[in-house]
Amino acid sequence: MARGWESKAVGDQIDAAAVEKSPSESRSLSPAQANTLREKKILELSRARVTSDLENSQDPRYRSLLMRALEDLDAKLAGLAQAG
C-alpha cells in the first residue's frame, strides 16, 4: 500500500535526524557549522517536496506559487553555500 505524504515526511525527518546524530560528524563540527548543516538539510528536504509537488500539479496558479517557492529555496541554498 502506498504511503501518504505525511508518512513520507515523517520518514524523511527520522532519516535526517539519524544522519544528524551520527557521533563522528557531530563531534567534529562547531555549533555554527552544525546549525548551517541542519538548515541546509531542511532546505534540501523542502526543495525536494516542492519539486515533487510541482511535477504533480496541474493548476497553473499553484504551479506559479511552487515555482516562486522553488526560486526562494534555491536562493537560500545559494546563500548558505556562499556563507559556508
Image (cartoon, helix red, strand yellow):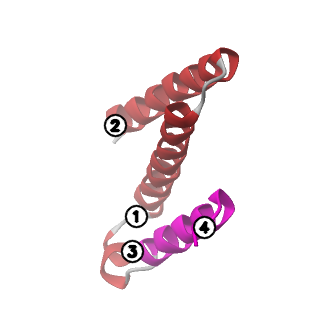
Say what secondary structure mark 4 lies in.
loop
Q: CA distance from mark 2 to mark 4?
A: 33 Å
The quarter in which the N terminus is drawn is: bottom right
Q: Within 10 angstroms of label 1, few (less than 14), some, or many (20 or more) residues?
A: few
Among numbered discs 2 and 1, the one appearing first in the sequence: 1
Say what secondary structure mark 3 lies in.
helix
Say what secondary structure mark 1 lies in.
loop
Among numbered discs 2 and 4, the one appearing first in the sequence: 4
> Who's the residue at 45% across and 54% down the image?
41
Span of residues in magenta: 1-20
Query: Closer to us: mark 4 or mark 1?
Result: 4
| Location of residue 54 in the rendering, given as x and y in whole percent from the top left corner | 54, 31
Mark 1 sits on what residue? 30
Residue 1, above or below 9? below
Q: Within 10 angstroms of label 2, few (less than 14), some, or many (20 or more) residues?
A: few
Question: The residue under label 1 is which amino acid type?
Answer: Ser
Mark 4 sits on what residue? 3
Tell me if 17 is positioned left or right of 82 in this view: right
Question: The residue under label 3 is which amino acid type?
Answer: Ser
Tell me if 81 is positioned left or right of 32 in this view: left
> Who's the residue at 65% across and 21% down the image?
65
Mark 3 sits on what residue? 26
Question: The residue under label 2 is which amino acid type?
Answer: Ala
